[in-house]
Amino acid sequence: MALRVYNTLSRKKETFETLEEGKVSMYVCGPTVYDSAHVGHAMSSLVFDIIRRYLEFSGYEVRHVMNYTDVDDKIIERANHEGVDPIELAERYINQYDQHVKELNILPATVYPRATEEISRIVKMVQELGEAEYAYAVDGDVYFRVERDEDYGKLSGQKTEDMQAGARLEVDDRKESHMDFALWKSAKPGEPSWESPWGKGRPGWHIECSVMSMHHLGEQIDIHGGGNDLVFPHHENEIAQTESLTGKPFARYWMHNGMLRFAGEKMSKSIGNLITISDFLAENEADMLRLMVLSSNYRHPLTFSEDVIAQSKQALERMRAALRPAFSDAKGASAEKLQALKDQKQNTHNAFKEAMEDDFNTASALGSIFDLVRIINQARDAKAIDEELKPAQTEVRDLTSVLGLRLEHREVQSSEVNGFVELLVEIRERLREDKQWELTDLVRDKLAELGIVLEDTKDATSWRWK
RNA sequence: GGCGACGUGGCCAAGCGGUAAGGCAAGGGUCUGCAAAACCCUGAUCACGAGUUCGAAUCUCGUCGUCGCCUCCA
């Protein structure tokens, strides 16, 4: 089996071959930190975390870079509004995102570069582009000369002549062409700025990623990723800048995740139809969001809704149930059942890999895991003992952890609370022996109100947090 | 106007030419003091139309609908 990856550049799935055997360099565009991140940002980070985890599972050593854009118009605007320093504002939201990364069980990137820490290299690259006549300066601003880049538009399939000038932004007639984009912006009074050959200013949006990618990963990289809203202009422009300078293909595989939708539209800060990651995690487990992402194709839009959240919650519970121990009266399952268990373990393992190798088909991979879940539960029902269930359960744990699922219940337990619950369960078991059903049910109902679920079997009771 | 994606059972969703995975929900059972969980059973011909083919959800063309991008955007 060979891993196949959809490449936005060729619009096809291609066999995955890295620049260097056994190693993957991956650059993912991170958020612009002017406000709290929403679950759409989380989706993107989750998608690339899953991709990374699978690559590592496959034996690759992954060098993963995710940047923070920590200087831009919105950050400045917001900082002025709040009366704080823009750099500090960015710092605040970077820290918050770092925290979300932990909470969402996203593996930390190898490096988290920031635009403001790469200014000298950015200036250097802009200068070099100028020397090669790919850039020109006007009143302290520097623009990229799109016309000089003959294959401009190859990523997004746009032809420069078909693009509507000023569709959303006013046309700046100081530019040679409306297509030209800023590499360097002159500073207005009060804005954060750095010295440069063109006067005080700051980097344009696209140049930072070119510079940081080259600095941390080299002139050519294996995977460049981000949301598909970045295809044009951001990634198109990154290609233009980088390849014009190096003369080499920038990234081998351009990978883009679909947008998260909410109420029928793309979730975005400008529309305002967003759920922040903090809000989501206050009510739900991180695994639920991850399962939502896993349930659909990463390139397609995913609709966020209460229904889908509830469905993910239940599906997660089903997975956890498969990991529960044997029944207390287990005495060993039939040879036939054990063979079925063994077969399905192998089938699931193979099907999982096959699905993931096909451009990370996580929905199909999940399906294969659920097939094993059913067989495990059947075996348990057929009196399999723990040792018999163990290999298959370990397989479920292994595969779900490749997907980044924790499958643990929310950490509510202080040991004290656990002790009290166990005491209640123990007393209730005595009541059950005496068939005091009213009291028995009362305890169960009251605990349910506190978020604790009791499940009785003939002679034992297990409990868990809801 | 240009570029692109999508439309599969009540909901989410896989499928890439050979007669529809999986999850959620629902109904009926088994188990059980009851409940829950688990297990078993039940349900779709794939937006619409035409075409290619022995054969199409899967290929082609068209129609309708939804969405994304066209310099703020994960």
Image (spheres, coloured by chain):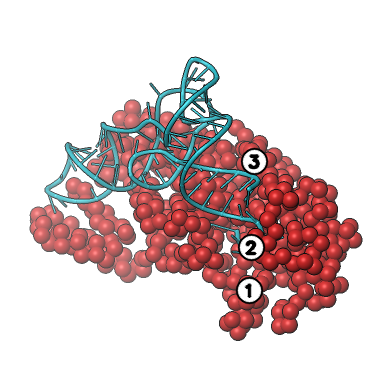
Chain colours: A red, B cyan
Mark found first going from the N terminus, 3 or 1: 3
* Residues at marks 3 and 1 touching, judged by CB atoms closer than 8 Å: no
**Marking on residue A94:** none
Residue A235 in the image: state x and y as whole percent. 69, 54
**Marking on residue A11:** 3
> Chain letter of disc 2?
A
SS type, badge 1: helix
> Alpha-carbon neighbours of circle 1 within 10 Å: few (<14), some, or many (≥20)?
many
Mark found first going from the N terminus, 2 or 1: 1
- Relative vertical location of residue A336 with respect to residue A56 in this rendering, above or below: above
Image quarter (top left, top right, bottom left or bottom right) of the N terminus of chain A? top right
The residue beneath circle 1 is: A75
Residue type at numbered disc 1 = Ile
> Alpha-carbon neighbours of circle 2 within 10 Å: few (<14), some, or many (≥20)?
few
Mark found first going from the N terminus, 3 or 2: 3
> Alpha-carbon neighbours of circle 3 within 10 Å: few (<14), some, or many (≥20)?
few
The residue beneath circle 2 is: A168
Image quarter (top left, top right, bottom left or bottom right) of the C terminus of chain A? bottom left
Residue A341 in the image: state x and y as whole percent. 38, 33
* Quarter of the figure with residue A242: bottom right
Residue type at numbered disc 2 = Arg
